[in-house]
Image: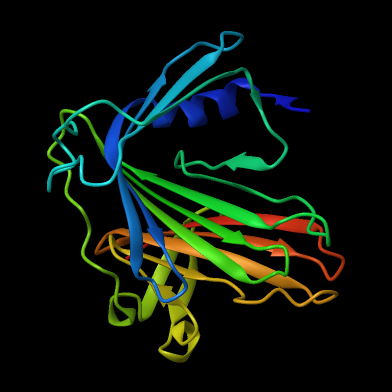
Amino acid sequence: MGIGLNVGEWELLQRNVGEWRGWFDSLDRTLQCTKRQPSLLTLKPAPPGVPLNLTLLLWPEGAGSSSPHKLPAGEPEKRIVQSFMRLDPDMGVFGTGSFSRGTLYRSTWTKLYAEFGFLHDQRRHRLVLLWDGAGELDRIVLIREFLAGSSALERPPLEPDQLIGDWRCDLPSPGDNICFSASDLDRWIFLPDGGAFLAPAQIDSHQPFSIEALWLSSATRLERISRRYSEHGALSSVNHQLLTR
């Protein structure tokens, strides 16, 4: 069951409105791309009390061009249409318009998943992580999206050196400094388009764990989202930080 959005949450969510062109890349456990689907996601604005309409079109592999700003050739092979007025309990929207959603309670009969959606200016960087029934990280989906009509570019692949050093926290607690060292980043998995994530390859039952993702949207702007689970498998907290330097 969904819960009602207040005006503030509705406005934050609508920072994502627009026509977003890009790619859905499916990666295996070694981060090799096994499938690339060109995509077009349209989110139409709506005032409070009026449904928000989302349409996602996916084209088959090979239908796209080297530029996300050009529509793919041919007809899409999949169309997803959603209309909603409520924010599901598994989703949180943050002050930048970025969001996260995922499994609320991990058990032996549910498969764990987590989605991280980062938004900045005319770009979106999204990451979906999926575990199988045995608790092993099974699939990684990296989604790079560009606002139609813009000249937005993909970010370079992220490297640890770009993060090392002091960062100032602008949200949610302005003024708090964070310092990344090389050892802090040892277990992070670095991705194309300025992204990275830290997640267990195997979920250990009865042990607490966390799933984190970040996006370096510019050399001086970093967003980080973490989802933390208790030893009982229940989601205990979702935290978001906007860091600058």
Residue at 17% x, 43% y is 152
In front of the other: 102 or 45: 102
Say left or right for 229 vs 9: right
In front of the other: 92 or 205: 205
Say left or right for 79 vs 92: left
Say left or right for 158 vs 48: left
| Residue 14: % across, % down | 45, 26
Say if 188 sits above or below 219 in the image.
Answer: below
Q: Quadrant of the N terminus?
A: top right
Residue at 82% x, 56% y is 109
Quadrant of res 43: top left
Say if 51 sits above or below 168 in the image.
Answer: above
Q: Most extreme residue toward the bottom, as rendered?
A: 183
| Residue 205: % across, % down | 82, 74
Say left or right for 210 vs 128: right
In front of the other: 56 or 91: 56
Say if 135 sits above or below 154 in the image.
Answer: below
Quadrant of res 69: top left
Say if 126 sits above or below 31 in the image.
Answer: above
| Residue 243: % across, % down | 42, 61
Say whether residue 173 is visible. no
Say whether residue 129 is visible. yes
| Residue 228: % across, % down | 70, 63
